[in-house]
């Protein structure tokens, strides 16, 4: 969710990567580094436990929806 309260979808490649990480550890995968799939998203990490996306360079935290 962005600062305007709107959901922004990830690309299909990023979505598939997130799903693969969750499938690899269905009991509670920790985090997903989005830059591994899309270099434009390199500052972002998704914390799967809290369902938040963090931007490492600014410290911003946004909600994430599966």
Image (cartoon, grey):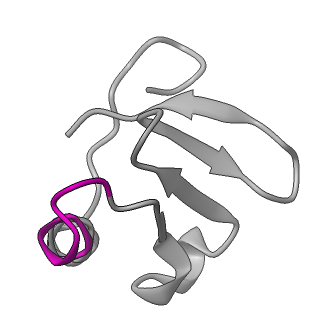
Q: Nearer the viewer, residue 51 or 27?
A: 27
| Residue pictured at 76% horizontal, 36% vertical | 60
Q: Considering the image in quadrants, where does the C terminus appear?
A: top left
Q: Is residue 58 left or right of residue 65?
A: right
Farthest-out residue, top: 5
| Residue pictured at 57% horizontal, 60% vertical | 45
Compared to residue 63, the image places residue 9 above or below, namely below
Compared to residue 37, the image places residue 23 above or below, namely above
Farthest-out residue, front: 27
Q: Is residue 8 left or right of residue 40?
A: left
Q: Is residue 3 magenta?
A: no
The percent coordinates of residue 21 (x first, y second) are 26, 73
The percent coordinates of residue 17 (x first, y second) are 24, 77
| Residue pictured at 87% horizontal, 47% vertical | 58
Total numbered badges shown on the rendered structure: 0
Q: Nearer the viewer, residue 44 or 12?
A: 44
Q: Is residue 30 left or right of residue 8?
A: right
Q: Nearer the viewer, residue 33 or 1?
A: 33
Compared to residue 23, the image places residue 37 above or below, namely below
The residue segment tinted magenta is: 21-28
Q: Considering the image in quadrants, where does the N terminus appear?
A: top left
| Residue pictured at 39% horizontal, 85% vertical | 37
The percent coordinates of residue 54 (x first, y second) are 65, 46
Q: Nearer the viewer, residue 32 or 2?
A: 32
The percent coordinates of residue 22 (x first, y second) are 21, 64
Q: Is residue 23 magenta?
A: yes
């Amino acid at each position: 969710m962005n600062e305007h309260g709107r959901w922004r979808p990830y690309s299909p490649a990023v979505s598939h990567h997130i799903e693969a990480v969750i499938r690899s550890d269905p009991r509670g995968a920790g985090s997903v580094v989005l830059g591994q799939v899309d270099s434009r998203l390199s500052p972002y990490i998704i914390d799967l436990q809290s369902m938040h996306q963090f931007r490492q360079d600014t410290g911003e935290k946004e909600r994430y929806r599966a």
